[in-house]
Structures are given as C-alpha cells and as structure tokens.
Amino acid sequence: MVKIAFDPIYSHPLPENHRFPMLKYELIPQQLLHEGTCTSNHFFKPSACQHEVVLDTHDEFYFNRLIEQQVSPSEQRRIGFPLSPELVNRELVITQGTIDIALHALKHGVGLNVAGGTHHAFAERGEGFCLLNDMAIASNFLLKNEYCQRILIIDLDVHQGNGTAKLLENNPKVFTFSMHGRTNYPFHKEQSDLDIELENGTTGKAYLTLLTEHLPRIIELFQPDFAFYLAGVDILNTDKFGRLEVSLEECKQRDEFVFKTLKNLDIPIAVALGGGYSPDIKVIVEAHCNTFRRAVELFD
C-alpha cells in the first residue's frame, strides 16, 4: 500500500499573510479521503526527526539556535516565517516524514509526504520558507545506513533547489537535477549536477520535451538505485510566482512521466510536494492531488 506522511500540526496559528500557503496541507488529505482515492490507512503521522540525524547534514551552531529560538530577526526575514517552537518541530516532523516515506518506498516502490521539499535550506541557514533540508537529510541518512548506493534528486519546483545543490555538491553518490525558472527566485543560483534553466513563458509542451529528453539520460548515465522527487506545482500558468505556461493537464503529465519512468526501471521514489501559489486554493489542491492520484493508481 502507498503510504503518505501527514501531520495535522500545520494548523498552528500563523500571521495572516502566511495562513493561505499553509492551508493546502490540510485540504489535500481531506480531498483525497473525500473522493475515495485514499483511506485513513494510507496516512501516518511521523515523529520528530532525531537531532543527530539532522546534524549529519546541518551545521550544529545553526541547528542549536533553531532549537533554542535564537535565530536573529534578519535571519527570520530571510526564512520568511516568524520563528516559533511549533515551526521548528513542524520542520523536524516533515524531515522524519521524508525519511519514513523513503524507507517505505524501498519496500513498496513509492512513498509520499504531504509537505517537504524544503530545498532552500543550507547547512548553516534557512531561507525561502525552509529551515531544514529534508531531502538532503534523508539522502545522507539512506547512504549512511547503506539502504542504497546512488540517489537521484529530481527537483521540478519552479525555483532552483539551491540549498540541496550546495549541501550535496561534493557527494558523488547523489545526483541533483533541477528544472527551474532562470530569472526566478533564488536570484543567486547554486550549481546542481544538472540545471535546466527555463525562460519566462516556457510552454508546457517545451517543458515536457525537456523533461522527457533529460531524465532518461540522467538515469542511464548515473544509474541511481533510489530517487527523491520534488513535485512542485508552481510551474502552473496560474501560479503567482511561476512565470511559466504549464497547464494543469501538462503538470499531471509531468508527474505521470516521472512515476512511470522510475517504476519501469524498479527505482524506488519518495515524493514531497514543494511549492504552489496559484490565487485559487482549489487549483493548488487539485494539482497536488493529481500527484497522489497517479501514485496510488500506479503503485497501490
């Protein structure tokens, strides 16, 4: 059975301007349950990630300041959220959720997290609504414990996974692949193992052509035995920040291509949501739910 990490702590109070982006984390499971795609048996609540696991990836001084609530106001502005104990715990739960779904995927082909993809977090700092880098932490955990040998990170959020690229730049056992807006945030890009930079207005057809050209080639050359997939839906033409022209149907085709490509090669895949900022919350939820629907159809 497909397993999906979900934690209802997302309902913790936040300032008004942060509530809308967080709403999807509650609505996605509700929609999947309501329509019958999932049952309660698909969902599980992760615990908080152990600190020593985080410290295999993140700087101890930075992490201790997060735990002790000593991050400066300027650092909090860079993160984008006001810091709180609940927020830090949420990030630890998200991270453990990504580890848990990866372990599940090793046995059952796929696991999904109703959150995650916190790819802007660096070893010594957070930014872009990211405190800890869940996929980098999970990658290091899998490799350290010899669950796999070669990991491919497929980052299809519209924003470059700059933190992920930097954290894993010297790890030959991890290949970082990012398709993102060339002129979009972050404005200083790091170097992934492969970056495909997209111009503003890139169509869904062009987007899918690039993906179908490069992903099989990466897999053939790198030969991964595990993959993380960051399935951001901020590539949509309705997104406030995406600047691309990808339709809802084409976003769905993207997910299907990634899932089928990896499944056909028996490469386990752990999926995290990433971004989505369309003004209509129904569009965000529908796009993310498409990812879960296709995973359940193919793997359940």
Image (tube, grey):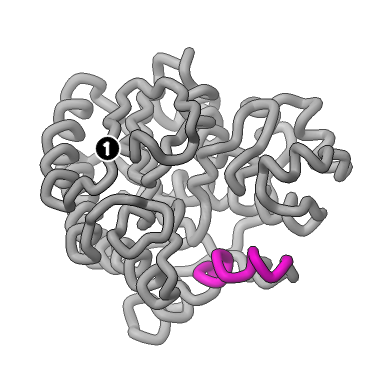
Q: 155 or 140, which lies in front?
A: 155
At a point 44% along the width and 70% down the height, the residue shown is 279
**On the image, numbered disc 1 is attached to which residue?**
198
In the image, residue 175 above or below residue 44: above
Main SS, magenta residues: helix
Q: Is residue 210 visible?
A: yes
Question: Which x, y percent locates residue 97?
Answer: 55, 52
Query: Does the magenta run of residues contain 18?
Result: yes
Question: Which x, y percent locates residue 238?
Answer: 33, 64
In the image, residue 31 above or below residue 146: below
Q: Amino acid at mark 1?
A: Leu
Q: 134 or 235, which lies in front?
A: 235
In the image, residue 11 above or below residue 242: below
Magenta segment range?
15-25
At a point 77% along the width and 58% down the height, the residue shown is 86
Locate residue 7 relative to residue 70 in the image: left or right. left
Query: Does the magenta run of residues contain 162?
Result: no
Locate residue 88 relative to residue 144 in the image: left or right. right
- Classed neighbour count for the residue bearing mark 1: other residues with Cα under 10 Å, few (<14), some (14–19), many (≥20): many
The quarter of the displayed image where residue 226 is located: top left
